Amino acid sequence: MTTHNNDISPLIGKLSAVLDQETKLVRSGDFDGTFGLQAEKNELISDFHYQVSQLDEQSKSGLADAFEDLNRLLTDNMSALAMARDISSGIIKRVADVVNGPRSANSYGSNGMKPTGPLPARRGIAVDKGY
């Protein structure tokens, strides 16, 4: 069975709209909004792959402009998602560095002075009974 251009064009339009919406949401930082698009996007991509596999070469060449536009949207979408991933990875690394970094003294010893030098990386309450 051969699929004609007019059969896949609406699908390309729907997929393009979802990709564009997801890209805008990612760029605006609305990651919760992107979660609602995932099922629809995955279904559209699956349908797209299937329908393209059913096209003859003449139909594929007739859709070259639509494929080029879709490719541009996919590239833009992947770029936005990669940037968001890099930003979130950087934030997670900075938080881990702060949590695991050197600790400063927040208590005083029996001599009334803050201890000098690095403190052990233990948590808890220290009580100095050297009165």
Image: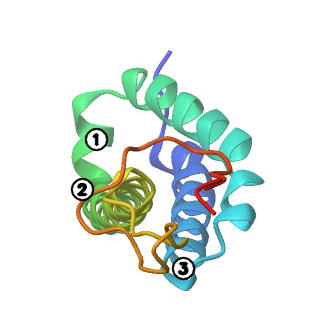
Q: Nearer the viewer, residue 57 or 75?
A: 75
Q: Nearer the viewer, residue 77 or 57?
A: 77
Q: Residue at x 66, y 53 (%)?
A: 127
**In front: mark 3 or mark 2?**
3
The residue that label 2 is drawn on is 64
Residue farthest toward the bottom in the current orientation of the protein: 28
Q: Amino acid at mark 1?
A: Lys
Secondary structure under badge 2?
helix
Mark 2: few/some/many CA within 10 Å (<14, 14-19, 20+) = few
Q: Amino acid at mark 2?
A: Ala
The residue that label 1 is drawn on is 60
The residue that label 3 is drawn on is 24
Quadrant into which the C terminus falls: bottom right
Left or right of residue 90: residue 91: right
Q: Nearer the viewer, residue 42 or 65?
A: 42
Left or right of residue 100: residue 108: right
Asked if the residue at tag 2 contacts the one at tag 1, i.e. Cβ–Cβ closer than 8 Å, the answer is yes
Residue 39: x, y in percent? 72, 39
Q: Nearer the viewer, residue 13 or 30?
A: 30
**How far apart, in angstroms, are the residues tagged by discs 3 and 1?**
29 Å
Residue 111: x, y in percent? 45, 74
Q: Residue at x 25, y 62 (%)?
A: 68
Secondary structure under badge 1?
helix
Secondary structure under badge 3?
helix
Q: How is the image coloured?
A: rainbow
